[in-house]
Image: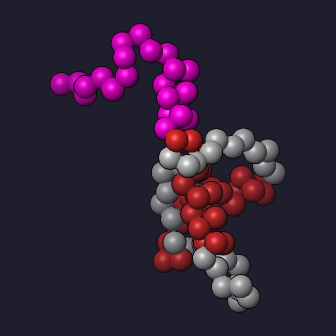
């Protein structure tokens, strides 16, 4: 048994991506593109693994939430390195 179609028959990947981006923007989000150093890519991978996150986007959003909610005078590195810190 297949799942029901969520997009019109004949829609392209570009059509689906445009619709997804529009929903994100309509909800107050934004589409961003960044150039990252190897160290940044490794940090995102470490956060993703430590927190069992499904995507790099989820890892970046988690890191931003941690920074936003961080103590103004952090005692240690505020990014998670272990599951219990997520």
The residue drawn where x is 49% and y is 16% is 12
The residue drawn where x is 71% and y is 52% is 41
The residue drawn where x is 30% and y is 23% is 5
Nearest to the observer: residue 19 or residue 67? 19
**Magenta region includes residue 3:** yes
* Residue 74 % position (x, y): 71, 86
The residue drawn where x is 75% and y is 45% is 34
Query: Furthest residue to the left?
Result: 1
Residue 27 visible within the image: yes
Q: Is residue 62 above or below residue 32?
A: below
Nearest to the observer: residue 82 or residue 35? 35
Residue 81 visible within the image: no
* Residue 35 % position (x, y): 79, 44
* Residue 14 % position (x, y): 56, 21
Q: Is residue 7 above or below residue 63?
A: above
The type of colouring in the image is secondary structure
Nearest to the observer: residue 56 or residue 21? 21
> Which range of residues does the magenta coloring cover?
1-24
Q: Is residue 44 above or below residue 20?
A: below
**Magenta region includes residue 21:** yes
Query: Furthest residue to the top?
Result: 10
Task: Choose top left, top right, bottom left or bottom right for residue 7.
Answer: top left
Instruction: State the quadrant of the N terminus.
Output: top left
* Residue 16 % position (x, y): 48, 25
Q: Is residue 56 left or right of residue 33?
A: left
């Amino acid at each position: 048994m297949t799942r029901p179609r969520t997009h019109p028959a004949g829609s392209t990947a570009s059509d689906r991506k445009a619709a997804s981006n529009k929903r994100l923007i309509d909800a107050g989000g934004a589409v961003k593109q960044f150039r990252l150093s190897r160290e940044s890519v490794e940090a995102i991978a470490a956060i993703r693994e430590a927190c069992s996150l499904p995507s790099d986007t989820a890892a970046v959003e988690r890191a931003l939430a941690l920074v936003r909610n961080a103590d103004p005078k952090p005692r240690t590195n505020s990014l998670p390195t272990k599951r219990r810190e997520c």
